[in-house]
Image: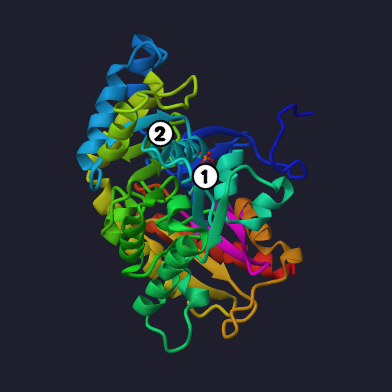
Amino acid sequence: MSHVFPRHTKSDLPTAVGGDGCYLIDANGKRYFDGSGGAAVSCLGHSDAAVIKAVQEQVEKLAFAHTGFMTSEPAEALADLLISKAPGTLDRVYFVSGGSEATEAAIKLARQYHLERGEPQRRHLIARRQSYHGNTLGALAAGGNAWRRQQFDPLLIGVSHIAPCYEYVDRSDGESSFDYGQRVANELEAEILRLGPDTVMAFMAEPVVGATLGAVPAVEGYFKRIREICDTYGVLLILDEVMCGMGRTGHLFACDADGVAPDILCIAKGLGAGYQPIGAMLCSSAIYDAIAQGTGFFQHGHTYLGHPVATAAGLAVVNQMLERDLVSRVAEKGTQLQAALMERFAQHPNVGDIRGRGLFRGLELVQDRDSKAPFDPAHGLAARIKRAALEAGLICYPMSGTRDGRMGDHILLAPPFILSETQIEEICDKLAIAIEEGLAAI
Ligand code: PLP
């Protein structure tokens, strides 16, 4: 009997024993194409020689130094590299061990920023329905996914949620994409005014929604309007790129495609590519200066901040992306993946939408393409497809989102950046089998 506490106590999962490029291998020698990189983590595949070497060398040289006493060479180098590529006035990097730690730190930094400026009443966070910002209590409070939150309500902080930018379901007939984006962005202004502008500390959103909707980018102009509203009311803009960042969308930072720069940016997953657990929060010089010229102490921290081996892995990952021009490759392979998915599934009666950016793609499953009605959540369709896909040798990420209290089924694909054209076909072949098996069972 296993003594590991699995997340799904009723599932019987294979034991991974090896990784080879885009494949994971289980204890029986079966190979699985990692079509979701776990959850958009394994962007370089599972056996990148340069990253493995960097990790080995760092652990031999210096395994750990607590950041309360010392910084380290790889942390300094990775921070410099990230800032040299980061948008806007992002100027400082706060390293953590994963996505929830990054978003949690962002929320606390936003609050402390306003405190340092003598605005203690600014403590309200606005986020979006259908979002996920992590599983720790603060991050969970920020997320707008009812299914993940409901057991733990009431949650910690004052948060309200506005509509996501979810064109497939919410754009009205006859409304242009642009007008739709402006309409939903303007919900932010309405909510700020409802709460009182001097009570709002920040707005938090994912540039491309990942774990709740399956790769939904905002329409053109949406984030520019959001940025404008934040600036008008002195509200900080926090972008959560934990899933969609680090090259995944065909841009090193996902917000580059939207032409906006946030005040705080959260990254994780692809930053360590699975070779080490690492995340980071990047903040603007204005925010850093407010702390530095105020109390001089960010009232937050964890033991493994800026871990030398994790930052060495992150440095090697980003260097690999840049040296091999993998971000351009993502854009190219992403276009091929979208075309292959369209060819295979666009006419499928239960595939309502195929969307995303770069190698971050989602399929939304519906009962009926005209009404876009989701399947009854009791069927657990996405979970069935995940199981059938595993059986067929494909790892894909299933999810159920809540919309007006209804659940919908989505499949997220986020394969390694190194995948080949043949492997794009392999994803489509195995996914087709899994979708048919999932549907046949309901
Ligand atoms: N934010 C987003 C957008 C995510 O998708 C996730 C995880 O899926 C998180 C935060 C939390 O990251 P982690 O699971 O590393 O804590």
Q: Is residue 316 above or below residue 185?
A: above
Task: Give, as a single range, the part of the protein colored magenta.
Answer: 392-413
Q: Badge 1 local density, few (<14 within 10 Å), some, or many (20+)?
A: some
Identify which residue is drawn at 43% across, 24% down. Answer: 305
Q: Going from the N terminus, do you reach mark 2 or mark 1 first?
A: 1
| x and y, in percent, of residue 59 in the image | 39, 14
Q: Amino acid at mark 1?
A: Gly
State the mark number for residue 79.
none
| x and y, in percent, of residue 97 in the image | 47, 30
2 and 1 marks in contact (CB < 8 Å): no
Quadrant location of the C terminus in the rendered image: bottom right
Identify which residue is drawn at 68% across, 59% down. Answer: 384
Q: How many marks?
A: 2
Which residue is at the front of the view, 412 or 246?
246
Q: Is residue 185 above or below residue 10?
A: below
> What main secondary structure does the magenta stretch of the protein show?
strand
Quadrant location of the N terminus in the rendered image: top right
Judge from the rendering whether residue 440 lies leftward or rightward of residue 132; answer left or right.
right
Find out whether residue 126 is within the magenta segment: no
| x and y, in percent, of residue 121 in the image | 48, 45
**Which residue is disc 2 drawn over?**
47
Which residue is at the front of the view, 27 or 309?
309
Q: Amino acid at mark 2?
A: Ser
Q: Nearer the viewer, mark 2 or mark 1?
A: 1
Q: From where the camera sits, is residue 213 visible?
A: no
Q: From where the camera sits, is residue 221 visible?
A: yes
The residue carrying mark 2 has its beta carbon less than 8 Å from ligand 1: no
Q: Badge 2 local density, few (<14 within 10 Å), some, or many (20+)?
A: some
**Which residue is disc 1 drawn over?**
38
Identify which residue is drawn at 52% across, 47% down. Answer: 133
